[in-house]
Image: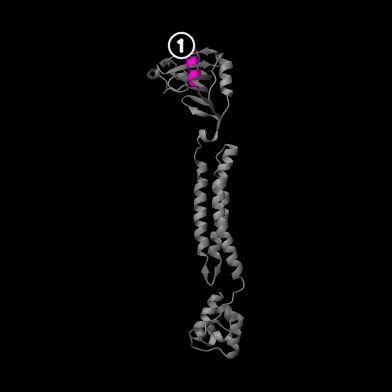
Amino acid sequence: MNVGQKIRENRERCELTHEQLGAIMSLSSASIMAWENNTSIPTASELKQLSEIFGVRLSSLITDVPAKRKEVKGETWKKVVSAVLQAFSLFALLIGFFIPFILMLALEKNCFWVCFIFCIIPIGSILFGYLVKVNGKKFIKNIISGFVSAGLLFCFGMMTLMPVDPYDSEVSYDDSLVIKAETTLNIDIPEFETSYLLTWEHGSNLWRGKMHAKCDLTFTNENATSFERTLVTDSKWMDRVPNALLGVFCHPTDYTNTGANDCYVLIYNCDTDEFNTLPTADGNYRMLSIIYDVTYNEMTICDYTVEYFK
């Protein structure tokens, strides 16, 4: 490798342009280019000055002995920052994935938007990789790790737009709706094994209405058998939903005549204090419906509002 090639190599390593190196040495850029093209040769004093600027031994510029590389000021911190940003990008991806689930369990709300906040770190890694160079090269690893982390976090964040299944976020285990049904309807619901209550703050859309709460109960075989004996003799319980009452029933497509032998149903109008009847006037009515499935020993209690019109 000749002198001109060594000058070019060291200049590029130090990230200096022809003009910048010429300005440091009080020479024109044309003089620097002439050295690199071997059309002229620097003097001894100029070679010494070049060795000081490049941080190398004078002998490495004029002999074929490989130059011992000296860290250019600023290279070390760039590499440290590069490694830190790569590590933080991976950490942001992991934390940004788990925190929304923790918040959803605590707040019972869709919290995937939190992922967008953690995108800041990998985006910073991408910008660092593009803008900062060492030996004229970009930090490619920062760019790749940043794009991967930011892309995945963005995808997680977009899940904010997805509706959350109420069974995942709003389910609770209490008997508040059971107590309301027993008190309002003056009936005795036997002891149950499990109770799953779902509530909707603004109501869940129903056909011609809104569901406010829904409770699912499961009975033991013994309790179910005892309860079923009372259903047969209690006039409030229907063994099917007449077609005429489908307009005020919470599930108009279920528990119709086809399931007459397997289910018992009770429909109560809280506003008119009537069982299993249609309102006499159009309007919005608060209703309670109870469906008992004989086959599976399960009961569903629904608290809803229905819009009725003749």
Q: Position of residue 35 (x, y in %)?
A: 52, 85
Question: Would you say residue 234 sits in the magenta stretch?
Answer: yes
Where is residue 23, by image quadrant? bottom right
From the viewer's side, name the closer residue of 96 and 45.
96
* Numbered range of the magenta stretch: 219-236
> Is residue 119 something one can see in this rendering?
no
Count of all numbered marks drawn on residues in the image: 1
Question: Would you say residue 49 sits in the magenta stretch?
Answer: no
Q: Furthest-front residue in view? A: 222
Residue count near mark 1 (Cα–Cα under 10 Å), binned few <14, some 14–19, many ≥20: few
Q: Is residue 177 above or below residue 69?
A: above
- From the viewer's perspective, tell me whether residue 302 is left or right of residue 260: right
Point 53% across, 61% down: residue: 142
Q: Furthest-bottom residue in view? A: 44
Check disc 1 and report the residue beneath it.
232
Q: Is residue 172 above or below residue 86?
A: above
The residue type indicated by label 1 comes to Val
Dot 1 lies on which element? helix
- Where the C terminus falls, by quadrant? top left
Point 54% across, 51% down: residue: 93
Main SS category, magenta section: helix
Q: Position of residue 66 (x, y in %)?
A: 52, 82
Q: Is residue 162 above or below residue 32?
A: above
> Is residue 307 something one can see in this rendering?
yes
Q: Position of residue 154 (x, y in %)?
A: 51, 49
Q: Is residue 214 above or below residue 164?
A: above
Q: Furthest-left residue in view? A: 258
Q: Position of residue 99 (x, y in %)?
A: 57, 45
Q: How is the image coloured?
A: one colour
From the viewer's side, name the closer residue of 64 and 208.
64
